[in-house]
Image (cartoon, helix red, strand yellow):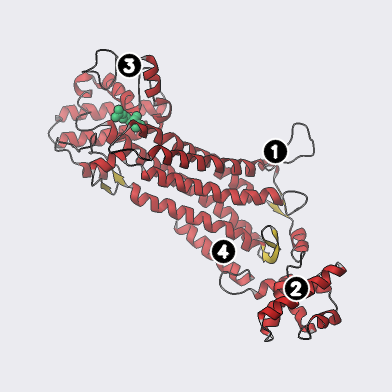
Amino acid sequence: NEGALWGGRFESGPAAAMAALSKSTHFDWVLAPYDVRASQAHARVLHKAGLLADDDLAAMLDGLGRLAADVASGEFVPSESDEDVHGALERGLIDRVGPEVGGRLRAGRSRNDQVATLFRMWLRDAVRRVAAGVLDVVDALATQAAAHPSAVMPGKTHLQAAQPVLLAHHLLAHTHPLLRDVQRLRDFDVRAAVSPYGSGALAGSSLGLDPEAIAAELAFDSSAENSIDATSSRDFAAEAAFVLAMIGVDLSRMAEEVILWSTPEFGYITLADAWSTGSSIMPQKKNPDVSELTRGKSGRLIGNLTGLLATLKAQPLAYNRDLQEDKEPVFDSVAQLELLLPAITGLVSTLEFHTDRMAELAPAGFTLATDIAEWLVRQGVPFRVAHEAAGACVRVAEARAVGLEDLTDDELAGVDPALTPDVREVLTVEGSIASRNARGGTAGIRVAEQLGGVRQLSESL
Ligand code: ARG
């Protein structure tokens, strides 16, 4: 059992299938740079506790520095016999400084507190990268909103024509969930910034080592209050997996619209060549693959979250080897978003909007009916009556196959005498939009205000 981290009480090494099952270097190697940094901090607390002589500390730090460089350059990689990243790096250190010095590093720590710490370090960095990518998408949406301050479109509920809105209002609607996701990622960090290092296998360290010193050196806010909890809980990982899945779900809602909008039936947008694909058989095709992959990968991100929660469920305290299954789903969610986010930013920033087509469709489906009812309310008519009258206008217009704005004065008065020709002031898409000027509404001044707010918030995150 050459190079293993244990063996004293064993007569034989693991069976080949046992070793194959146990192995994690093919995915946990991404933790290697964090492992070396944590080892450097650990060496210093060993020295401070009087467990490592001055020259041994110097040799160890020198060896770890060279090991870090060799990991970064790809010179040092896990070997076939390494079980995990921790064992591989101990082998690498001993290769560089010899067993006498290299064999001292492991005192007072366990792979259980190591892996819990390194996973937190990796995830805190990864989440910052993801947040930056999400803010790029927000910026692309805000820039498109700013470029189309007065373009109108059909607003829908149930995917049916509802009320006209500003395109900018609709685009900004997608920024808010994404900004909340970034806030969630920032908030996650508050709880993730607690270091398990010094918890040992579960019970803490007896060697007079200082967990707070390591925590500070590794940029954590504090060290763990309970070593059993610190080595066995992974709610931090589940929390991140949730936010990553939520980002996927939020992006998928936008992606679905891009897919619909790019069909000839909608005709709202044209996708840039660089962010679409063709068909191997149908020469005319231009497919919205970025959006479809977003929709598809959102399912994968949900799967990563539910898989992780299922792994964590009902595990007794403290560390169990089940926990080795915690990393791949989270690594995968981050990797998928790192692929998706730049592509979505590219897609959104290059969307070409057919604003004439959207304006033409904005009043279609009698979307101004609510405006008639509300105009009547302003004339003192009870809303129940007004709603009936506006509905009757729709019936008359539908029977004649015209829009509400095409009803004659006589037709209007025939529905309800209160419907004087003055009602025409709200029977335009622009009039309808301008009238919805309460906070959060679709009126141009409100949307401009909102754009400023979105920009300000995204810069503050
Ligand atoms: N590779 C393990 C993990 O990812 C850490 C090793 C802990 N192993 C152990 N036998 N205690 O969780």
**Earlier residue among tags 3 and 1:** 3
The spot of residue 370 in percent (x, y) is: 70, 73
* SS class, disc 2: helix
Name the mark on residue 451.
Answer: 4
In which quadrant is the N terminus drawn?
top left
* SS class, disc 3: loop
Is 416 drawn above or below residue 336 in the view shown?
below
Which residue occupies 23% across, 37% down? 202
Is 122 drawn above or below residue 430 in the view shown?
above
Instruction: Say which residue label 3 marks.
Output: 14
Q: Does the residue labelled 4 lie within 8 Å of ligand 1?
A: no
State the CA–CA distance, disc 2 to disc 4: 35 Å
* SS class, disc 1: loop
Q: Which amino acid does label 1 sit on?
A: Thr
Do the CB atoms of the residues marked 2 and 3 lie less than 8 Å apart? no
Which of the pair 162/26 is nearer the observer? Answer: 162
* SS class, disc 4: helix
Q: Which amino acid does label 3 sit on?
A: Pro
Which residue occupies 74% across, 56% down? 354
Q: Does the residue labelled 2 lie within 8 Å of ligand 1?
A: no
State the CA–CA distance, disc 3 to disc 4: 61 Å
Do the CB atoms of the residues marked 1 and 4 lie less than 8 Å apart? no
- Badge nearest the viewer, 1 or 4: 1
**Earlier residue among tags 3 and 4:** 3
Instruction: Say which residue label 2 marks.
Output: 391
- Badge nearest the viewer, 2 or 4: 2
Instruction: Say which residue label 1 marks.
Output: 277
State the CA–CA distance, disc 2 to disc 3: 78 Å
State the CA–CA distance, disc 2 to disc 1: 45 Å
Rendering quarter of residue 436: bottom right
**Mark 1 neighbour class, 10 Å CA radius: few under 14, some 14 to 19, many 20 or more:** some
